[in-house]
Amino acid sequence: MTIMNHRLTAVLRTLLGFFFVAGPLAAIFHLSEPVLPPDAAAFVEALAKTGYMMPLLWSTEILAGLMLLSGMLVPVALLLLAPVIVNIAAFHVFLAPGQMGPAVLVVTLELFLAWKYRGSFASLFAPQANPGGPGVATTLKSRAA
C-alpha cells in the first residue's frame, strides 16, 4: 500500500469512527433529534421502549467507533458495525428514504474499509474452518510427526 493510499484509508477509517462515536453520543444527550417520517419515528420509539436495544446499539457503535478511531482491531470493528450498517441502510430505504445521504456515505465507507482490510477476513470464508486457527494445525501436525 502506498503512503498516499495508507493515509486515505486512515482518514476514511477515522471519519467512519467519528460517525459511530459522535452519532450515538448526540442521540444519548439529545443534541440532535432529526424529524423522522411517522413510520421511522414509530420504529425508533419501539426500539427505545424495549429498554435495552438503544443502549446495546449505542454501546456497540461507540465501542466500534473508538476501535476505528484508535486504529486498533479495525477488522473486528468493521464486523461489529456490519449488521448495524445494514440496518441503517434498510431503515433509510424503507422508512426514511428522504434522508439517504448519511446512510449512503456510511455504507460506502464500510465497503471501502472492508475491501482494504479484506486479507483479515480471508479465514472467515475458508471452506473448512480450523477451530484452533491456521497456526494450530501446523503445530499439531509437527508434534504428531
Image (cartoon, helix red, strand yellow):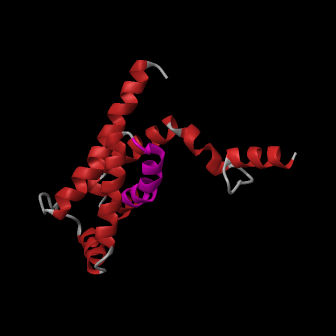
Judged left or right of residue 138, residue 23 is left
Q: Residue furthest left?
A: 31
- Expressed as whole percent of the image width and height from the top left, the position of residue 122 reads 62, 43
Q: How many marks?
A: 0
User: In which quadrant of the rendered view does residue 53 lie?
Assistant: bottom left
Q: Is there any visible trace of residue 97 in the rendered image?
A: yes
Q: Residue furthest bottom?
A: 50
Residue 31: horizontal and vertical position, in percent? 11, 58
Q: Position of residue 27 (x, y in %)?
A: 19, 61
Considering depth in this image, is 24 or 132 the residue closer to the camera? 132
Q: Quadrant of the C terminus?
A: top right
Range of magenta residues: 72-88
Q: Quadrant of residue 72?
A: top left
Q: Residue at x 30, y 40 (%)?
A: 15
Residue at 14 percent of width and 62 percent of height: 29
Indicate left or right for 3 with 36 as reference.
Answer: right
* Above or below for 130 versus 54: above
Horizontal side of residue 128 vs 23, given as left or right: right
| Nearest to the observer: residue 13 or residue 142 | 142
Q: Is residue 104 visible?
A: no
Q: Is residue 135 above or below residue 27?
A: above
- Residue at point 41%, 19% (across, down): 3
Asked if the magenta segment contains residue 133, the reply would be: no
Viewer-proximal residue among 41 and 31: 31
What residue do we see at 26% from left, 80% from top? 49
Q: Residue furthest right?
A: 145
Q: Position of residue 12 (x, y in %)?
A: 35, 35
Task: Examine the residues drawn in magenta and state their main secondary structure.
Answer: helix
Q: Is residue 73 magenta?
A: yes
